[in-house]
Image (spheres, coloured by chain):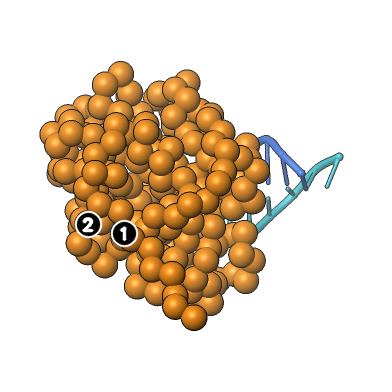
Chain colours: A orange, B blue, C cyan
DNA sequence: CCAACGATGGTCT
DNA sequence: GACCATCGTTGGC
Protein backbone atom coordinates (compact mmCIF):
# COMPACT_ATOMS: atom_id res chain seq x y z
CA UNK A 1 0.00 0.00 0.00
CA UNK A 2 1.33 3.40 -0.96
CA UNK A 3 0.88 5.87 1.88
CA UNK A 4 -1.10 8.94 0.97
CA UNK A 5 1.20 11.93 0.90
CA UNK A 6 -0.50 15.16 1.82
CA UNK A 7 0.96 18.42 0.66
CA UNK A 8 2.11 21.04 3.16
CA UNK A 9 0.19 24.26 2.63
CA UNK A 10 2.18 27.16 1.19
CA UNK A 11 2.38 30.91 0.97
CA UNK A 12 -0.84 31.38 -1.00
CA UNK A 13 -2.89 29.63 1.71
CA UNK A 14 -1.52 31.78 4.54
CA UNK A 15 -1.99 35.01 2.56
CA UNK A 16 -5.79 34.83 2.71
CA UNK A 17 -7.56 37.55 4.72
CA UNK A 18 -7.37 36.66 8.42
CA UNK A 19 -11.03 35.71 8.94
CA UNK A 20 -10.94 33.53 5.81
CA UNK A 21 -7.75 31.88 7.03
CA UNK A 22 -9.22 31.23 10.49
CA UNK A 23 -12.09 29.34 8.83
CA UNK A 24 -9.89 27.63 6.21
CA UNK A 25 -7.59 26.24 8.92
CA UNK A 26 -10.45 24.15 10.35
CA UNK A 27 -10.00 20.54 9.26
CA UNK A 28 -6.33 21.02 8.32
CA UNK A 29 -3.61 19.00 10.04
CA UNK A 30 -0.92 20.53 12.26
CA UNK A 31 2.27 18.46 12.33
CA UNK A 32 5.42 18.77 14.42
CA UNK A 33 7.89 15.91 14.37
CA UNK A 34 5.76 12.77 14.79
CA UNK A 35 2.80 14.55 16.36
CA UNK A 36 -0.29 15.32 14.32
CA UNK A 37 -3.67 16.84 15.06
CA UNK A 38 -6.63 18.21 13.13
CA UNK A 39 -7.44 21.85 13.82
CA UNK A 40 -11.02 22.07 15.13
CA UNK A 41 -11.19 25.55 16.73
CA UNK A 42 -9.63 28.94 15.88
CA UNK A 43 -9.97 32.64 16.70
CA UNK A 44 -9.13 35.65 14.50
CA UNK A 45 -7.35 38.73 15.87
CA UNK A 46 -7.52 41.81 13.65
CA UNK A 47 -5.48 45.00 13.40
CA UNK A 48 -8.42 47.38 13.00
CA UNK A 49 -11.19 47.92 15.54
CA UNK A 50 -10.13 44.93 17.62
CA UNK A 51 -9.01 45.96 21.12
CA UNK A 52 -8.59 42.27 22.01
CA UNK A 53 -5.67 41.94 19.59
CA UNK A 54 -2.16 42.07 21.08
CA UNK A 55 -1.06 44.24 18.16
CA UNK A 56 -3.82 46.83 18.67
CA UNK A 57 -1.61 49.08 20.81
CA UNK A 58 1.37 48.95 18.48
CA UNK A 59 4.64 47.09 18.14
CA UNK A 60 6.32 45.75 21.29
CA UNK A 61 9.01 43.18 21.95
CA UNK A 62 6.41 40.51 22.70
CA UNK A 63 4.12 40.98 19.71
CA UNK A 64 6.83 41.66 17.08
CA UNK A 65 6.26 38.33 15.25
CA UNK A 66 2.65 39.39 14.56
CA UNK A 67 3.97 42.18 12.34
CA UNK A 68 6.00 39.73 10.26
CA UNK A 69 4.85 37.78 7.19
CA UNK A 70 1.82 35.49 7.12
CA UNK A 71 2.69 31.91 7.94
CA UNK A 72 5.08 32.79 10.74
CA UNK A 73 4.41 31.56 14.27
CA UNK A 74 3.62 33.78 17.26
CA UNK A 75 3.93 32.10 20.67
CA UNK A 76 3.43 33.93 23.96
CA UNK A 77 3.18 33.01 27.64
CA UNK A 78 -0.21 33.50 29.29
CA UNK A 79 -0.97 33.55 33.02
CA UNK A 80 2.67 32.72 33.73
CA UNK A 81 2.11 29.03 33.01
CA UNK A 82 0.78 28.30 29.53
CA UNK A 83 1.75 29.10 25.98
CA UNK A 84 -0.62 30.17 23.21
CA UNK A 85 0.11 29.25 19.58
CA UNK A 86 -0.85 31.66 16.80
CA UNK A 87 -0.38 31.72 13.04
CA UNK A 88 0.52 35.20 11.77
CA UNK A 89 -1.79 36.43 9.02
CA UNK A 90 -2.70 39.52 7.03
CA UNK A 91 -0.25 41.81 5.30
CA UNK A 92 3.26 42.20 6.67
CA UNK A 93 3.29 45.15 9.08
CA UNK A 94 -0.42 44.96 9.98
CA UNK A 95 -0.29 42.72 13.04
CA UNK A 96 -2.99 40.07 12.62
CA UNK A 97 -3.03 36.41 13.65
CA UNK A 98 -5.14 33.29 14.13
CA UNK A 99 -5.09 31.63 17.55
CA UNK A 100 -5.24 27.83 17.39
CA UNK A 101 -7.57 26.87 20.25
CA UNK A 102 -8.14 23.12 19.85
CA UNK A 103 -6.97 20.07 17.94
CA UNK A 104 -8.29 16.55 17.45
CA UNK A 105 -5.31 14.28 18.29
CA UNK A 106 -4.33 11.97 15.41
CA UNK A 107 -0.76 10.73 15.83
CA UNK A 108 1.69 10.63 18.74
CA UNK A 109 -1.03 10.25 21.31
CA UNK A 110 1.10 8.41 23.90
CA UNK A 111 3.59 11.30 24.03
CA UNK A 112 0.71 13.76 24.37
CA UNK A 113 -0.71 11.70 27.25
CA UNK A 114 2.65 11.72 29.02
CA UNK A 115 3.08 15.47 28.62
CA UNK A 116 -0.48 16.24 29.70
CA UNK A 117 -0.45 13.71 32.56
CA UNK A 118 -3.78 12.24 31.54
CA UNK A 119 -5.00 9.31 29.43
CA UNK A 120 -8.22 11.00 28.40
CA UNK A 121 -8.06 11.80 24.66
CA UNK A 122 -10.62 14.59 24.96
CA UNK A 123 -8.36 16.37 27.43
CA UNK A 124 -5.13 16.39 25.41
CA UNK A 125 -5.61 19.30 22.99
CA UNK A 126 -9.04 20.80 23.81
CA UNK A 127 -7.79 24.29 24.69
CA UNK A 128 -4.98 26.68 23.65
CA UNK A 129 -2.80 25.93 26.70
CA UNK A 130 -3.46 22.20 26.50
CA UNK A 131 -2.44 21.77 22.88
CA UNK A 132 0.84 23.65 23.28
CA UNK A 133 1.67 21.41 26.25
CA UNK A 134 0.73 18.24 24.32
CA UNK A 135 2.73 19.30 21.24
CA UNK A 136 5.66 20.76 23.18
CA UNK A 137 5.21 24.22 21.67
CA UNK A 138 7.13 26.93 23.59
CA UNK A 139 8.83 30.26 22.96
CA UNK A 140 11.60 28.40 21.17
CA UNK A 141 9.13 28.11 18.28
CA UNK A 142 8.33 31.83 18.33
CA UNK A 143 8.75 33.50 14.91
CA UNK A 144 9.55 30.27 13.04
CA UNK A 145 7.89 29.84 9.64
CA UNK A 146 5.32 27.18 8.82
CA UNK A 147 6.65 27.26 5.24
CA UNK A 148 10.06 25.75 5.99
CA UNK A 149 10.44 24.80 9.65
CA UNK A 150 9.82 21.75 11.84
CA UNK A 151 6.12 22.64 12.07
CA UNK A 152 3.80 22.38 9.08
CA UNK A 153 0.13 22.57 8.16
CA UNK A 154 -1.10 19.84 5.82
CA UNK A 155 -4.06 20.01 3.50
CA UNK A 156 -6.97 17.64 3.96
CA UNK A 157 -10.39 17.17 2.49
CA UNK A 158 -12.49 16.88 5.58
CA UNK A 159 -16.12 17.83 5.24
CA UNK A 160 -17.48 19.88 8.11
CA UNK A 161 -19.78 22.73 9.07
CA UNK A 162 -18.42 25.82 10.77
CA UNK A 163 -20.02 27.42 13.82
CA UNK A 164 -19.25 31.08 14.71
CA UNK A 165 -19.25 32.64 18.19
CA UNK A 166 -17.62 35.32 20.32
CA UNK A 167 -14.05 34.70 21.45
CA UNK A 168 -13.14 33.12 24.79
CA UNK A 169 -11.52 34.76 27.80
CA UNK A 170 -11.26 38.38 26.64
CA UNK A 171 -12.12 41.55 28.52
CA UNK A 172 -11.77 43.87 25.50
CA UNK A 173 -13.35 42.95 22.17
CA UNK A 174 -15.51 40.25 23.70
CA UNK A 175 -18.53 41.15 21.55
CA UNK A 176 -16.82 40.37 18.21
CA UNK A 177 -17.83 37.08 16.60
CA UNK A 178 -14.39 35.90 15.57
CA UNK A 179 -14.29 32.38 17.00
CA UNK A 180 -14.76 29.48 14.60
CA UNK A 181 -15.08 25.77 15.27
CA UNK A 182 -16.19 22.54 13.64
CA UNK A 183 -19.82 22.04 14.59
CA UNK A 184 -20.38 19.20 17.03
CA UNK A 185 -16.71 18.19 17.28
CA UNK A 186 -15.97 16.70 20.68
CA UNK A 187 -12.42 18.07 20.85
CA UNK A 188 -13.48 21.74 20.80
CA UNK A 189 -12.55 23.56 24.04
CA UNK A 190 -15.12 22.99 26.77
CA UNK A 191 -17.30 26.08 26.56
CA UNK A 192 -20.08 26.25 23.93
CA UNK A 193 -19.39 23.30 21.67
C1' DC B 1 -23.12 18.79 36.73
C1' DC B 2 -20.88 23.75 37.38
C1' DA B 3 -19.17 28.11 39.59
C1' DA B 4 -15.34 29.96 42.11
C1' DC B 5 -10.63 30.41 42.80
C1' DG B 6 -5.54 30.13 43.04
C1' DA B 7 -1.16 29.22 40.61
C1' DT B 8 2.38 31.88 38.33
C1' DG B 9 5.54 35.05 35.71
C1' DG B 10 6.18 37.95 31.57
C1' DT B 11 4.73 42.30 29.79
C1' DC B 12 3.34 46.91 29.86
C1' DT B 13 2.13 51.47 32.30
C1' DG C 1 1.54 47.36 40.33
C1' DA C 2 -2.05 45.61 37.29
C1' DC C 3 -3.29 42.71 33.82
C1' DC C 4 -3.78 38.66 31.37
C1' DA C 5 -6.35 35.09 24.13
C1' DT C 6 -5.70 29.38 30.89
C1' DC C 7 -6.25 25.28 33.52
C1' DG C 8 -6.94 22.01 37.38
C1' DT C 9 -8.89 21.62 41.72
C1' DT C 10 -12.24 22.31 45.07
C1' DG C 11 -16.62 22.32 47.07
C1' DG C 12 -21.39 23.01 46.15
C1' DC C 13 -25.55 20.81 44.39
Image quadrant containing the C terminus of chain A: top right
Q: What residue do we see at 52% from left, 66% from top? A: A106
Is the residue A175 above or below the residue A12 in the image? Answer: above
Q: Nearer the viewer, residue C3 or A9?
A: A9
The front one of A64 and A109 is A109
Residue at 55% x, 46% y: name it. Answer: A159
Answer above or below: position of A168 versus B10: above
**What residue is shown at x 35% (from left), y 56% (from top)?**
A153
Q: Secondary structure at mark 2?
A: loop
* Residue toward you, A75 or A104: A104
Q: Which mark is residue A8?
A: 1
Mark 1 → mark 2, Cα distance in angstroms: 8 Å
* Whole-percent x, y for residue A168 in the image: 49, 35
Return the mark for residue A43.
Answer: none
The structure residue drawn at horizontal position 62% and vertical position 37%, both measured from the top left corner, is A192
**Left or right placement of residue B2 versus residue A167 in this view:** right
In contact (CB < 8 Å): disc 1 and disc 2: yes
Q: Work out whether disc 1 and disc 2 sit on a shared chain.
A: yes
Closer mark to the observer between disc 1 and disc 2: 1
Q: Residues within 10 Å of mark 2 (few under 14, many from 20)?
A: some
Asked if residue A34 can be seen in this view, the reply is: yes
Residue A136 in sight from this viewpoint: no
Q: Dot 1, how many residues are within 10 Å of its Cα: few (below 14), some (14-19), or many (20+)?
A: some
Relative to A90, C7 lies left or right:
right
The chain letter for the residue carrying disc 1 is A
- Chain letter of the residue carrying label 2: A
Left or right for A118, reference A82: right
The percent coordinates of residue A190 (x first, y second) are: 61, 46
Q: Which residue is mark 2?
A: A147
Determine the secondary structure under disc 1.
loop
Q: Earlier in the sequence, mark 1 or mark 2?
A: 1
**Which x, y percent locates residue A34?**
40, 74
Amino acid sequence: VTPIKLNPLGKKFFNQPTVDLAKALLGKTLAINNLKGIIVETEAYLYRDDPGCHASRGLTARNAPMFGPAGHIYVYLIYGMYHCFNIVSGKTGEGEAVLIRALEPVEGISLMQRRRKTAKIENLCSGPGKLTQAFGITKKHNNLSLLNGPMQIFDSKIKHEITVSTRIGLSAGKELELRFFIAGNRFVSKKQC
